[in-house]
């Protein structure tokens, strides 16, 4: 049984995590706008109780609030369009499919007037299957195969973001053979890398994506020399989970120097500044409002163009996490609880029936998440807990530090918010655990949008299995 708890923060608790007044509260910035507790204390998302979803679909379970996705997509669309119009240009939003992609998500963001960004042949096929017009798709990737590029050209993909000299030559050969012209952007490294509220500006950036600025002009010259390629502009992405506009401003200034240089040889109609806009994962995260980001970034571009005496190009952006991150909530069932004595006190381990197979981000990046009891409200005082998974890895941690009610017990449901981005795409079958289903909720109704796997699915891929 859980030991007695008290409200004092243990010495090993992170400084940013304060003891909450109520370990049952739902922090508005972290959860979908529809999230609340019903009269029985259950968490409700999109008008559907998580307990009811768990009863029908089992756990683990990823719940996606459709209205949250659509609202955030529309807010991003409007914020950048309004800011662009104020500075005499246009802005186009591409949903970054790598955050979470399935045919339902594709349809939702298309309905909100967004385009789709993909980075593999598989993502391209999902976007097309979801109804995306190929001309509205941008295709990324540092190692697109000849087959992927040929499929993209054949399908009529609107923009391919070229990432290497080899890729330019592959496209040159493909377009010559099929007799088509392909629109391309050149991805460049500005030497600016931003994470959350910090950014680092260097002369060179050591990464696999894009061309260094010093090599970009030669690459553009080669593109312009290929009859089957149409150079449409530059692309630059500086990082992920970014708060503030400082990194974007610095990066834009550097890329505009190149943009101005390239204008001497022809048109440079478009500038794509990527995405990476941050969201709240915990109560202390304070992401920059999207309207402030849009105005700050576009104003920086407009000011830079004015200083150089050049026209403001059409702008594009590629948010993903900012659209789907807070729309997703993962539901687990608590299996075991263990108190471990440390020199500084007691560490409570709360084990759930999922883990790093459905959310690898904590293990990969040390990502911080929140958690709440979902099937009821707790009655005891908060206790510092570590929510861990069922995998045979000591690093199988879902939520490293969180205050939960002291009476959490086996059989309770636990909900982890802000799991809409990158959790399902990074999921695996580690320890032969089936990947969970994705269920969309809206207006009190729920529907499966990605079927959960079964053990039979796993065995079906085993060539040695005899039915």
Image (tube, rainbow, N blue to C red):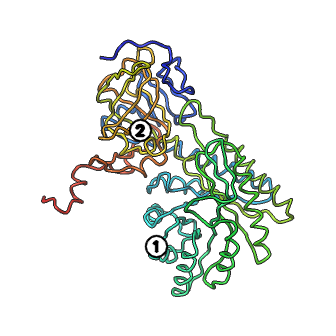
User: For the point 72% across and 63% down, which residue is it?
Assistant: 314
**Spatial CA span between label 2 and label 1:** 34 Å
The one nearer the camera, 300 or 157, is 300
**Residue 259 in picture, x, y percent from top left:** 75, 67
User: For the point 37% across and 26% down, which residue is it?
Assistant: 375
**Residue 64 in picture, x, y percent from top left:** 45, 43
Provide the secondary structure element on which disc 2 rests: strand
For residue 131, the mark is none
Provide the secondary structure element on which disc 1 rests: loop
Q: Tag 1 or tag 2, which sits nearer the N-term?
A: 1
The one nearer the camera, 310 or 450, is 310
Q: Is residue 38 above or below residue 141?
A: above
For residue 330, the mark is 2
Which corner quadrant holds the N terminus? Answer: top left
The one nearer the camera, 183 or 403, is 403
For residue 145, the mark is 1
Crowding around mark 1 (Cα neighbors within 10 Å: few <14, some 14 to 19, many 20+) is some
In front: label 2 or label 1: 1
**Residue 52 in picture, x, y percent from top left:** 35, 33
Tell me if I can see residue 184 in this picture. yes
User: For the point 80% across and 58% down, which residue is it?
Assistant: 88
């Amino acid at each position: 049984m859980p030991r007695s708890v008290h409200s004092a923060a243990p010495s090993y608790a992170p400084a940013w995590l304060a003891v909450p007044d109520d370990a049952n509260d739902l922090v508005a910035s972290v959860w979908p706008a529809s999230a609340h507790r019903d009269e029985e204390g259950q968490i409700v998302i999109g008008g559907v109780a998580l307990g009811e979803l768990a009863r029908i679909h089992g756990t683990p379970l990823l719940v996606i609030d459709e209205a949250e996705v659509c609202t955030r997509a529309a807010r991003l669309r409007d914020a950048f369009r309004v800011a662009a119009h104020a500075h005499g240009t246009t802005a186009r939003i591409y949903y970054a499919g790598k955050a979470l992609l399935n045919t339902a998500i594709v349809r939702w963001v298309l309905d909100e007037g967004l385009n789709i960004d993909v980075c593999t042949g598989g993502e391209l096929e999902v976007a097309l299957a979801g109804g995306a017009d190929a001309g509205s798709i941008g295709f990324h990737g540092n190692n697109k195969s000849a087959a992927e590029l040929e499929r993209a050209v054949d399908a009529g993909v609107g923009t391919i973001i070229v990432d290497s000299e080899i890729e330019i030559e592959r496209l040159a050969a493909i377009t010559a053979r099929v007799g088509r012209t392909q629109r391309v952007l050149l991805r460049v490294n500005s030497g600016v890398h931003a994470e959350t509220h910090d950014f680092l500006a260097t002369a060179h950036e050591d990464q696999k994506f894009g061309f260094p600025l010093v090599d970009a002009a030669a690459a553009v010259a080669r593109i312009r020399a290929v009859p089957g390629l149409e150079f449409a502009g530059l692309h630059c992405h500086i990082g992920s989970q970014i708060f503030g506009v400082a990194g974007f401003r610095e990066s834009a200034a550097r890329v505009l120097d190149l943009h101005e240089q390239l204008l001497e040889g022809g048109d440079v109609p478009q500038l794509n500044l990527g995405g990476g806009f941050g969201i709240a994962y915990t109560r202390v995260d304070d992401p920059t409002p999207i309207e402030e980001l849009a105005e700050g970034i576009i104003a920086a571009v407009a000011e830079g163009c004015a200083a150089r005496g050049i026209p403001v190009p059409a702008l594009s952006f590629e948010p993903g996490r900012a659209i789907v991150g807070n729309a997703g909530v993962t539901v687990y069932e608590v299996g075991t609880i263990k108190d471990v004595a440390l020199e500084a006190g007691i560490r409570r381990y709360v084990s759930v029936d999922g883990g790093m197979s459905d959310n690898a981000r904590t293990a990969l990046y040390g990502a911080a998440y929140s958690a709440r009891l979902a099937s009821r409200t707790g009655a005891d005082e908060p206790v510092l807990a570590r929510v861990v998974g069922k995998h045979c890895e000591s690093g199988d941690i879902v939520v490293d530090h969180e205050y939960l009610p002291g009476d959490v017990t086996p059989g309770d449901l636990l909900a982890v918010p802000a799991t809409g981005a990158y959790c399902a795409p990074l999921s695996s079958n580690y320890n032969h655990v089936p990947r969970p289903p994705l269920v969309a909720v809206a207006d009190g109704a729920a529907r499966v949008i990605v079927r959960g796997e079964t053990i039979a699915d796993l065995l079906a891929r085993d060539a040695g299995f005899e039915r």
